[in-house]
Amino acid sequence: MGFFNRLFRKIEDVNKGETAVSELESEFYIESTVEDAMEYWVEMAQNIIVNTVKATNNTVERAFVLVDLGEQPSFDIFYQIDGGLVMWDQLDSQSIKEKIENELLPQASNVATAVNDNFTQAEHPNIAYAELQFEWLTGAWFSHIIWEDDKDSKLPKDEILNKWFDTLSKEIQSKPLDSDSKLAWYP
């Protein structure tokens, strides 16, 4: 739980008379914990997904992002449109492609640094890759993390991307657009 969440929760407890005022002092510490780093990652992942969908003017059925947070950070984005998967650079709209290329993709390096600095400070392994999924009809989104100390973090990014794309291409054929459930990950 982040610093402000802890502090406000403690203030609420004091206001309700459930905690003594003297206990407020115990909440005045700032420390980067694994929980704080995860909370930050979730916030960042939500922003990535929201911006990935907004870039298309909300015209997609599902959105998928492979986030590479390693030495060469990148976002590999693809969408489900009209029942099929398409990479972002294969979209019909030139303006959408330009928006993704010029506004979204360049953020990958800053995202990787910001996210993994928190895990480093918490003395936790960094995120090597993350796979994000978003389903438009339900608003559901899901995240799968591959940590740098996981053997799968050594897989080439192209293998992860291509096999995930291929797996999803088959799975979406039988998964309703309002399933409110995650689809497969690779690995």
Image: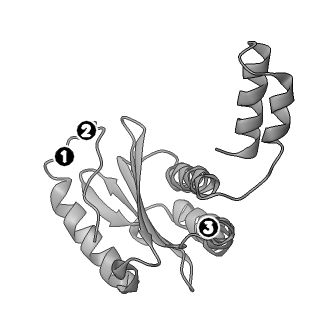
Q: Position of residue 175 (x, y in %)?
A: 18, 46
Sequence order check, earlier mark of 3 and 2:
3
The image position of residue 52, as x and y in percent, is 52, 56
Element under disc 1: loop
Q: Nearer the viewer, residue 89 or 145?
A: 145
**Which quarter of the picture shows residue 109?**
bottom right
Marks 3/2: CA–CA distance: 33 Å
Dot 1: few (<14), some (14–19), or many (≥20) neighbours within 10 Å?
A: some
Task: Using residue 4 as the reference point, say whether residue 57 is left or right of it.
Answer: left
Q: Nearer the viewer, residue 46 or 106?
A: 46
Q: Residue at x 28, y 36 (%)?
A: 178
If you read the primary sequence from the N terminus, does the residue marked by circle 3 or circle 1 appear first?
3
Residue 59 in percent (x, y) is at 43, 46
In this rendering, the answer to whether 95 lies above or below 151 is: above
**The N terminus, quarter of image:** top right
Q: Amino acid at mark 2?
A: Ser
Q: Which mark is residue 137?
A: none
Residue at numbered disc 3: 119
